[in-house]
Amino acid sequence: MFANLSKKICLFLLLAPICSEVSLTKSKKVRKRKSASKKNARFADRRKRYIRPHQDTPWKQLTEAQHIDLLEFSRKASDGELELRILLLLSKTAKLHSNLKKYLLELADFYFEKSNLEKAIEYYQSYALLYPGSLEAEYAAYKALIASFYSTLEPYRDQTSTERTIELATKFLKEVARKEYQDEAKQIIKSCTKKLFQHEVYVLDNYIKQNKFKPAQMRIDYIKKHFIKSVKDADKIVVHLEEALEQAKDPKTRPFFVGVNFDYVDPQTTWSHQRRRVNRIKF
């Protein structure tokens, strides 16, 4: 009797790990099936949400309402190419005048968010020109200014966009009513003027290095005329530049490097306009 009992106990001890392993394997399989079914349900729900509407209708036969459905779908699906295509089409074919205004401004915002700044400036300025009495005309002019400011280059590169930005900001200050916009426009003028000053110093520095002393003196005269009053410490820098020019004329005192070092910062990293969405309705 005891021998049979001991045999049963030994058999139980041998089979227990195997049984537990089998049960664990079964439970893992059940959990995998449940997670897979949940995952499939999520994907199915996502597919339903992002099924493109009006797939059976040819593109040329779509109505304005169907284009608007497609526009909403493109934004949900983050399809920028489709969104741009529909906005361009709607801006050309919109029957209602109010809709045309809306799509024109949405196109400008789209280009701005995609960092296509030249296109954004073009559409913002078109809107401000076509609808000067609109509640959003001030917003459009403001965003054109910001886009132009973002397009400015480093001081050692071409400054055409910087000059354009100063011109836009000066015009904007005469027309804008909101104090918040006025303060930003003044700050932009200040920043761009400093960049133009840095550009002139950079060009002057190159003239001195190339022994072109007459053009260098002309640059100093130009800096004195246009930047002494508008740029902080410009008078001190001009004194340094004049001394450097005189030293450069004499080979004995000519320094190895002549110039002023500026800490340039990209305007898109220092300004928060891209992160802050301006409300276009409350004007």
Image: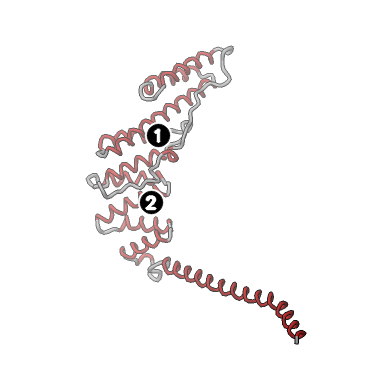
Farthest residue to the left: give it: 133
Q: How crowded is mark 1: few (under 14 residues within 10 Å), some or many (20 or more)?
A: many
Q: Return the residue nearer the eye: 252 or 214.
A: 252
Name the quadrant containing residue 8. bottom right
In the figure, 180 relative to 50: above or below? above
Relative to 88, 283 lies left or right: left
Q: What element carries label 2?
A: helix
Q: Residue at x 32, y 41 (%)?
A: 142
In space, the residues marked 1 and 2 are separated at their CA atoms by 23 Å
* Mark drawn on residue 174: none
Q: Which of marks 1 and 2 is nearer the N terminus?
A: 2
Quadrant, the N terminus: bottom right
Amino acid type shown at disc 1: Thr
Relative to 88, 205 lies left or right: right
Name the residue carrying label 1. Answer: 162
x, y percent for residue 147:
38, 42
x, y percent for residue 234:
41, 21
Q: Return the residue nearer the eye: 146 or 5.
A: 5
Relative to 39, 16 lies left or right: right
Name the residue carrying label 2. Answer: 110
Amino acid type shown at disc 2: Phe
Q: Return the residue nearer the eye: 158 or 270.
A: 270
